[in-house]
Amino acid sequence: MSIEFLLTTLVIVATPGTGVLYTLAAGLSRGARTSVVAALGCTLGILPHMLAAITGLAALLHTSALGFHVLKYLGVVYLLYMAWTTLRDKGALAVEETAPRSAAKIITSGVLINILNPKLTIFFFAFLPQFVNTSEPAAFLRMLGLSAVFMLVTFVVFVGYGVFAAAVRNHVISRLAVVLWMRRVFAGSFAALAGRLALTDR
């Protein structure tokens, strides 16, 4: 494993996106434990894209305009749904000390956020081959290993974001105006990400 791979992975993972946003919202609304669960869900959502890239399905998605756009607009709809529920549902950024929501639901939302993003599949398809010689006998295993490292870094970085959000949670939830502002910011961010996804091409 090269230093270039680790540095590139860290930059890519640390760049704020839908997963980071979701994990931050979980940390702010329900604390460190929930943010860890959210980070796990977002990390698991990478798995289908990773497997698609390794098995060559990403190439099919890249050449199939219909498949790409169907997945893309499902992602847009889900992000808009996240924006709506964040804005309207008090549970998304609640002032209460506890907001009941099962770990399964938190993980499912995190997985869906990343599954419904076709750009991740294309990204893996373009990213992994740069660090693997596909002609070498153990190329498949090497791609699996690098993908596992990518997922591990994703989980660690997302947990860092979530724990930080949880650490400042008490300062946030004690101020209703800040809670309302944060809810609007997260909702607007989800909507903006939906718009950006809708405008992306293969």
Image (cartoon, grey):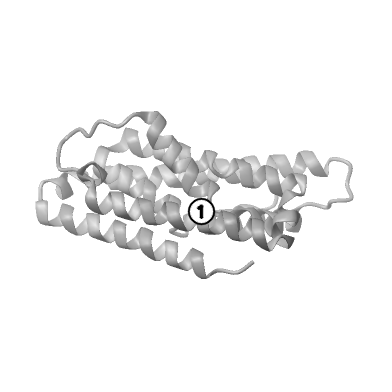
Q: Is residue 184 visible?
A: yes
Picture residue at 46% right of the left edge, 38% below the top: 41
Q: Total marks drawn?
A: 1
Residue 7 seen from this side: no
Q: Quadrant of residue 167?
A: top left
Q: Quadrant of the C terminus?
A: bottom right
Horizontal and vertical percent for residue 63? Answer: 74, 62
Q: Nearer the viewer, residue 49 or 35?
A: 49
Q: Are there few (<14), some (14-19), or many (20+) residues within 10 Å of tag 1?
A: some
| Residue 31 horizontal side relative to residue 140, left or right | left
Instruction: Say whether residue 64 is left or right of residue 116.
Output: right
Compare residues 195 and 137 and report the one nearer the observer: 195
Q: Position of residue 98 (x, y in %)?
A: 20, 32
Residue 153 drawn at (x, y percent):
54, 45
Q: Residue at x 35, y 39 (%)?
A: 35
Residue in view at x 55 percent, y 68 percent: 200
Where is residue 33? Give x, y as percent: 33, 33
| Amino acid tagged 1 | Leu
State the residue in front, 9 or 182: 182
| Horizontal arrangement in the rendering, residue 113 relative to residue 54 (left or right) | left
For mark 1, what is the residue?
74
Residue 45 vertical placement versus 5 (above, below): above
Q: Is residue 166 left or right of residue 146?
A: left
SS for callout 1 = helix
Please report the residue visible at 38 percent of the width from the left and 57 percent of the height from the top.
80
